[in-house]
Amino acid sequence: MPEGDATQRAPVEAYLPANTDELVSLYDESFHLTECSARHRHTYAVDSLVDATLWHVYPELLAPSTKSAVDFVLSSGLPRNVEVANAKTGDRRTLTVFRSPHGLGVVEADDMSSLRGTYSQGENDRALLFHQATHDVLTGLPNRRQFSDQLRSALPVSKGARFALMQIDLDDFKPVNDTLGHGAGDTVLKMAAERIRSVLGEHEIAYRLAGDEFAVIQQRASQPREAERLAEALVGAFKEPFTVEGINVFVGASVGVAIAPADGNEFEQLMKAADIALYAAKKDGRRRARKFSRSMLMVLEQRETLRRSLRTALKEGQFFIEYQPLVQPPFSIVGFEALLRWRHPVVGIIPPSIFIPMAETDGLMREIGQWALEQACREAMSWPEHFTVAVNLSPAEFLHEGLTDRIAQTLDLVGIRADRLELEITESVLLERTINNLDTLNTLKMLGVQISLDDFGTYYSSLSYLKNFPFDTIKIDQYFIKDLEIDEKSQTIVRFIVALAHGLGMSVTAEGVETAEQATLLKKTKCDRLQGYFLGKPIPTEEIGTFLGKLRPPVSLENFLISAPTQSLNPRRM
Ligand code: C2E
Ligand code: MG
Ligand code: MG
């Protein structure tokens, strides 16, 4: 780390593969001795040397054959065993030369006589051990330990100096691991590391921190210009798909950038800034880079405030449910989907896409989900008896032990018929724990509740789920409905899903139906149920009576479409 201050460096012990009783010495990038073990200091009388360098201590390394080994270690980051001969005595020794955080390190074997003449296995093992301790085995990149050593030693920066820290997180990596297996996941990680490395220049080092998290430290002074350029190059390196076992997988990269000292001049502070920037990149749609700014911090603080108030929201009765009609063509309402909302006393109404992920990470979702289930069932008791109520289950609720007991108890407590309750789960739930999932779904079926696969088509849409799990209904995601009138491919996909579901004895609901044309097409395609703003927006329970009243006498969807093709059936729009 060229701009690092020697006084900030971690102690020599941090870089030693074995005990400090060895002959270990560390040098900076201009080969000046910076640290050494006590034994080395004594053996080489280091204190008597003025401005000791690697070449003073080991003049043998200056020979052309050994000098090239030193250059190799510096450029590749890989350790090398170098055999040297003492010019005066002819004694041969093996030195393990390795890349240290600030330049080079050298370890000499304990028992020199045992090393004479050949490379020893012990030395090779030592080199390997050191490399393993500081590098990631899979990708060959320096690991988290190296990363934090180097980052810590670079901070605080000396006056006038600047450098950039980038946190990189892969987008959509988990589904690759989950669906194609860990072998494929490892291949993608290796290729990802290669792509990251391919855009790096001088003074730019990449690290693998964990899983699909990487980092880059860029020691260049023209900041933030250089960082912005590199961050864009990193994102760009992931534009093309990865081909694994003949399959193209699209894994992107999100990058968060923080500049020292402007965004932080201490380890924790700079890491947090890069983390916040990475979070912003993810929030803004992923596959992009963001540089840290103070306003991000404000957004985060607001989120934190929101998150804290979520803890008391349930107690204070701030949740309520809106119901969106499920319509069977020709137009007849068969039920409603319960959609949870949070009425925050200051912020106003907050959609589930904001607070459910928070509740999930904070472990609050089970309690909130139980409230929603019970409330929806209770409210459904006041509707006509043949109406079903669909309740969404989040992964945290579904995967929690005791879900089936909880559902059975709720049915008993509220006194609602089991076949009126429909549970909506998404595919992501099924990716987690396949065998127990099947048990859970089968038990729910035995209770008599119906099960829908929500948002079908958006994730990996593995057909094996349809074969193995007992769904009653598949809900086609709005993504395929929104351009149905103009996109023939969407039409083909919808036709295919309907045929597939019917062939498997399942029914199909289309989500997000917004226009009369979409409704007509879906009806022609033999879609069993429709849901969307065209047929009715989500409404509070108190409005359901009025909604149903306004629709009486029943209007056939066909008639309705002929007489008023551009209007909505939603009473709010009528
Ligand atoms: P979802 O289950 O796929 O619900 C459908 C979402 O699409 C709802 O958004 C609904 O308001 C919206 N929508 C319906 N028709 C249309 C349309 O024609 N056009 C457009 N653009 N959107 C339409 P909402 O209410 O924001 O809910 C979002 C997601 O939050 C739901 O997706 C569901 O996954 C989750 N969610 C909602 N309530 C609950 C709950 O009680 N528990 C759990 N675990 N998740 C819930
Ligand atoms: Mg749903
Ligand atoms: Mg959905």
Image (spheres, grey):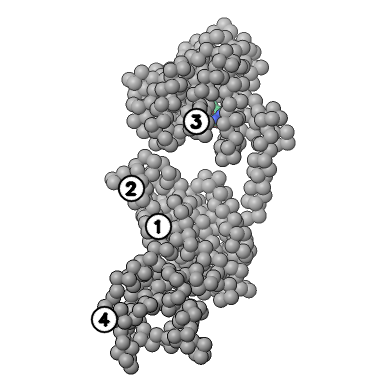
Do the CB atoms of the residues marked 2 and 3 lie less than 8 Å apart? no
Foreground label between 2 and 4? 4
Amino acid type, callout 2: Gly
Which image quarter is the C terminus in?
Answer: top right
Instruction: Provide the secondary structure element on which disc 1 rests.
Output: helix
Image quarter of residue 105 = bottom left
Q: Residue 220 in the image: x percent, y percent?
A: 52, 69
- First of labels 1, 3 by sequence position: 1
Q: Which residue is mark 2?
A: 183
Q: Position of residue 433 (x, y in %)?
A: 42, 35
Dot in front, 1 or 3: 3
Q: Which residue in the protein does label 3 denote?
A: 401
Q: CA distance from mark 4 to mark 1?
A: 38 Å
Q: Is residue 377 visible?
A: yes
Q: Amino acid at mark 1?
A: Ala
Decide: few, some or many residues near mark 4? Use Cα within 10 Å; few <14, some 14-19, many ≥20: some
For label 1, the residue is: 193
Disc 2 and disc 4: Cα gap in Å? 42 Å
The amino acid type found where label 3 is placed reads: Glu
Marks 4,3: beta carbons within 8 A? no
Give the number of the disc on residue 117: 4
> Looking at the image, do the residues carrying marks 2 and 4 touch, with CB atoms under 8 Å apart?
no
